[in-house]
Image (tube, helix red, strand yellow):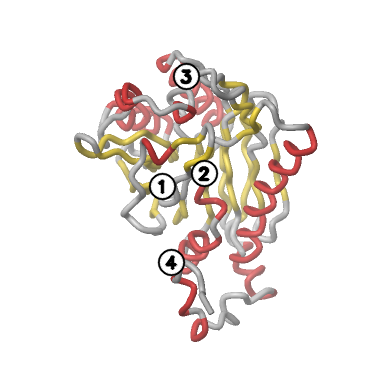
Amino acid sequence: MKELKVGVLQQHNTRDIADNKRRLAEGVRALAADGAQLVVLQELHNSLYFCQVEDVDNFDLAEPIPGPSTEYFGQLARELGVVIVTSLFERRAPGLYHNTAVVIERDGSIAGTYRKMHIPDDPAYYEKFYFTPGDLGFHPIDTSVGRLGVMVCWDQWYPEGARLMALQGAELLIYPTAIGYAASDSADEQQRQREAWTTVQRGHAVANGLPVVAVNRVGFEPDPSGQTPGIEFWGSTFVTGPQGELLYRASADGEERRIVDLDLGHSEQVRRWWPFLRDRRIDEYGDITRRYIDR
């Protein structure tokens, strides 16, 4: 048995970046005090979700890596002896920006980074305006608590990324997230969207025999332009086991923090029962890299 105590932190953000970071630190400290070894934060956790509008002034929110936030969370990780998965707006060079997850080791060093590969461009989610698609590929990050398959939000809809992480020995899949409903959506449509989001990631757990950790922000954030009704981020942070079983699911409308006990060794047993990796027809998948298979 290889046990891991994973702490998740679901937070409502405001315009006050310093206060957002202060409350995140309080949450991490509380989780660490309760025994968390790994803490996962939500996508772009320092600020409001600025991608509801296309505004060049928002590029001022970006920062280099290493930079102020990796130093801030690095000091926190070193103080508490925990591994922290952060999600930052990276300024790589003038005019070149990424949506980047940074894994901070327990000694405060950077264990590795992942740049978001799949970039949406939908009403109120204008991420292509801000983020260059990732160029680091899908590669797990080795840490003192295990090999982490870290991806970001929109990546969670694509089974290919999860599979590539699994094929390189990832021991769990992690998705910092910022997703919600349009405030104008009907209650039925809201439910369909939230359940689809949960279901697809539970499928990644089943298909790969790995636990999944998805951490979402929560609460309403208005559209600064007034062109849309704003986004109600649906929270519902969750953790599954390697058969897709829900071990924890947060509320849809409130801040929460929780420690979930994972048995990383259980994946070995599940894969013996369901040997999906053994039975893959790798000789027949060549067309998967095509945009569409035209006849």
Labels 3 and 1: the sequence-earlier one: 3
| Residue assigned mark 4 | 168
**Circle number at residue 285:** none
Find the distance from the CA under tag 4 to the CA under tag 2: 20 Å
Query: What amino acid is found at the position of numbered circle 3 in the picture?
Result: Asn
200 is higher (above) or lower (below) than 99 = below
Residue 277, position as x, y percentages in the image: 57, 76
| Residue assigned mark 1 | 116
202 is higher (above) or lower (below) than 93 = below
Mark 1 element type: loop
Labels 2 and 3: the sequence-earlier one: 3
Find the distance from the CA under tag 4 to the CA under tag 1: 18 Å
Query: Where does the N terminus fall, quadrant-wise?
Result: bottom right
Crowdedness of circle 2 by 10 Å Cα count: few (<14), some, many (20+)? many
Q: Circles 4 and 3: CB distance less than 8 Å?
A: no
Residue under the image location 50 percent in, 69 percent down:
292
Q: Circles 1 and 2: CB distance less than 8 Å?
A: yes
Crowdedness of circle 4 by 10 Å Cα count: few (<14), some, many (20+)? few
Horizontal side of residue 93 vs 69, given as left or right: left
Crowdedness of circle 3 by 10 Å Cα count: few (<14), some, many (20+)? some
Residue 98, position as x, y percentages in the image: 33, 41
Horizontal side of residue 72 vs 173, given as left or right: left
Query: What amino acid is found at the position of numbered circle 2 in the picture?
Result: Cys
Query: What amino acid is found at the position of numbered circle 1 in the picture?
Result: Lys
The residue nearer to you, when weighing 20 against 77, is 20
